[in-house]
Structures are given as C-alpha cells and as structure tokens.
Image (tube, coloured by chain):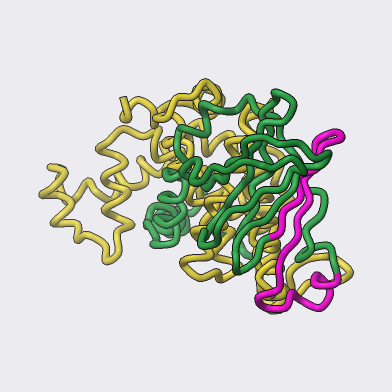
Chain colours: A yellow, B green
Amino acid sequence: MAAELSDWDLPALVKASVDRDEEAWNELVRRFAGLVAFVIRHYRLSQADTQDVSQLVWLRLVEHLADIREPSALPGWLGTTTRHECERYLRINGRSVAMDPLTMRISDKADEPEVDELLLAAERRQVLLDGLRELNEGHRELLLMLTADPPFAYAEISRILGIPIGSIGPTRSRVLDKLRDTDAVRAYLEADNSAQIGRCP
Amino acid sequence: MPWRNWSDDEELLLDIGDAVRPEPLEQEVLQAGRAVRAWHLTDVDKALAALLYDSHLDGLAAVRGPVSGSPRNLVFALGELRVEIELSDTGIEGQLIPPEPGQVWLLDATGPVAETTADEVGCFAFPAGRKGPIRIECVVAGRRVATEWISN
C-alpha cells in the first residue's frame, strides 16, 4: 500500500487525507517535510523549537486541508505558513527577527536569500524528488549512486547495477534527459517562471 | 540566489544530490508530522474559535519584547462566544464568555490530555507543565468549539 501511495498525485493525496486516511496523511507529511524543514532552517531554531513550530504547521494543515480548492497551491501555502509560524514563535519567545521596515522582509544578514527565493528553492527540490519518483528503479539507482557523498566509483556502479563501465557515461546523460522529460520537471520548466529562474530554459 | 542550470548535466546532478540527501532537521519535521495523529483527521467537524488577541504579539510586549515569565493572555472568538485564557508558569486559567458551565478539554498534538469543568461563571483551570502546541476545546450550547492552535 505504502509503495503505491508514493505514486499518488497531490489532489488524490489531499482528498484521501480529508477522508481520514492516515496512510495518505503520512505520505503527505513525507512529501512536504523537506519544504517545511527548508524554511525552518532559515530561522535557525533549536531542535525543540523546530519540533514545536513544525507540529504547529502540520496541525494547521490538518484544519486547512478540507478548504483546499487547488492542491497545487499547497506547497506555497505550507511555505508561507511555516515562515509565519517561525516569525511568530520567535516573537512570542522574546527573540526578535530583524525586519527591513520597507520591505517587511527578514534582513538579519545582507547575503540571506529572500523568502520567495527560499520557497522557490524548496519547490525546485520537490520537483526533482517528484521527477526521480517517475523514473524506473534502475535509472533512479544510477542517479543516486552518482550523486552519493562520497560518490560511487564507476567500477562499483558497474558491479552493483550490472552495466558495463563504458556505458555508464552515456547512460548517465540519457537518464538525466529522461529526468528532464518527466512530468514533474517538464511542468516546472514550462511554467512561466523564466523570469525568476534566470538562465533555466 | 543563482540557480543551477538544469540543462547542464553536472549542475543537474549537484541539485539531485542536494535534493535527495536526508538531513536531520527534515527528520525532525517528519516526526512532528507523524505525531499529529489521525485522531485530528477524524474530528474536523468542530467549530473553530479564531485568535483575536495575544498579549505577546499584540500588546506592549510585542513592542518591548515579552518579560520572561510574565503571563500571556489570549482571546479567541467565534461569533458572540469568547474563550479567554491566561498562560503562566503556574498553569492555564480561562473563562468562557458569556459565562456558562460545561466541559472543557486541553489538547496537545496527540489528542486530549486533560479535562475539567467550567463553573457557573465559566471559569476553568488546568495545571502547568505542557510544552508544544495546545488548544482548548469546550462544549457551549450543545456545540463543540475548539480554539486555534497556539504555541506554548
């Protein structure tokens, strides 16, 4: 069941969660934990604070789920809610968040990325994870081995995946092309966000 | 933030590596999500009282920063109903307005953790010692009402 759930699209997951399906809820949490963590990391909360804030975000999501008309808006909602809860949490606990009064943006460090950029970076990460999920297992394995830290040697990859060393390079570019051609990545690249992502095609 | 170029194999691989590497913070967030039990999903029919006032956000404290240990006053509203609570080191004291006796529950992310009765002037109290998000639930005029979640 769990293996199938990871293939569900977002509208199906949201609907199943509203219909009180605990497995669907867990899958929803699994899919978006990265995004929530991404935003929280920006505020440098302690471990205990992270737990409180993220719990609050999930609790609000439970109440928000039934009102979601457009599931594709969920990542944006989660990102904004997480940011909001982080700032509220810091204020309630007497720790200030430096804000630029003109833009109402966090400005504790000049080189800090803007929140919009954080959300976009989190979205890009999610797009890649969704894209990887669309690949077949062999192709996904290859990419995971190539990007492992430290990376696997070609000889090892060849032995584990049973492909000749000489074909790893060509397979690598072919699989990356497949990744670019997944629904998730294509939809993202085709969406009209070229202004934000600059040099992406 | 310069985005990596996904049409470049090397840059795309770098982004994939960053995307799939699990980090401890994400684990933390994941566990928090799992701790929000299905229990909540089965009980969505209650009416929600929205936060109207939070002394640590709206009052003088919001300007000066809350004094450590000072009580925090919160007001939740749903139509004519007000749920007022004060959080302090000694516990939670609250009142239902208009005053009405009834059952009152204290909940955390895992479900109800304490139950008490509001007296004839609507006052109720819970002992201290709970960390993390909480909410108050009560039955008023036959209707189950829950306050918004608050961080504690």
Quadrant location, the C terminus of chain B = bottom right
- Work out whether A26 lies above or below A169: above
- Tally of numbered tags: 0
Question: Which residue is located at x 80 percent, y 72 percent?
Answer: B61
The image quadrant of residue A67 is: top right
- Work out whether B43 lies above or below A192: above
Quadrant location, the N terminus of chain B = bottom right
Question: Which residue is located at x 30 percent, y 50 percent?
Answer: A144
* Extreme residue toward the front, this view: B120
Residue A96: x and y in percent read 72, 75
Viewed as shown, does residue A163 lie left or right of A59? left
Q: Nearer the viewer, residue A113 or B36?
A: B36
Q: Nearer the viewer, residue B67 or B94?
A: B94
Magenta-highlighted residues: B60-86
* Extreme residue toward the right, this view: A102
Q: Nearer the viewer, residue B64 or B14?
A: B64
The image quadrant of residue A103 is: bottom right
Viewed as shown, does residue A3 lie left or right of B151? left
- Work out whether A31 lies above or below B70: above
Is A17 included in the stretch rendered in magenta?
A: no
Q: Nearer the viewer, residue A72 or B102?
A: B102
Question: Which residue is located at x 81 percent, y 78 percent?
Answer: B64
Residue A113: x and y in percent read 66, 67
Residue A102 shows in the view = yes
Is B71 included in the stretch rendered in magenta?
A: yes
Residue B70: x and y in percent read 71, 73
Question: Which residue is located at x 76 percent, y 50 percent?
Answer: B84
The image quadrant of residue A106 is: bottom right
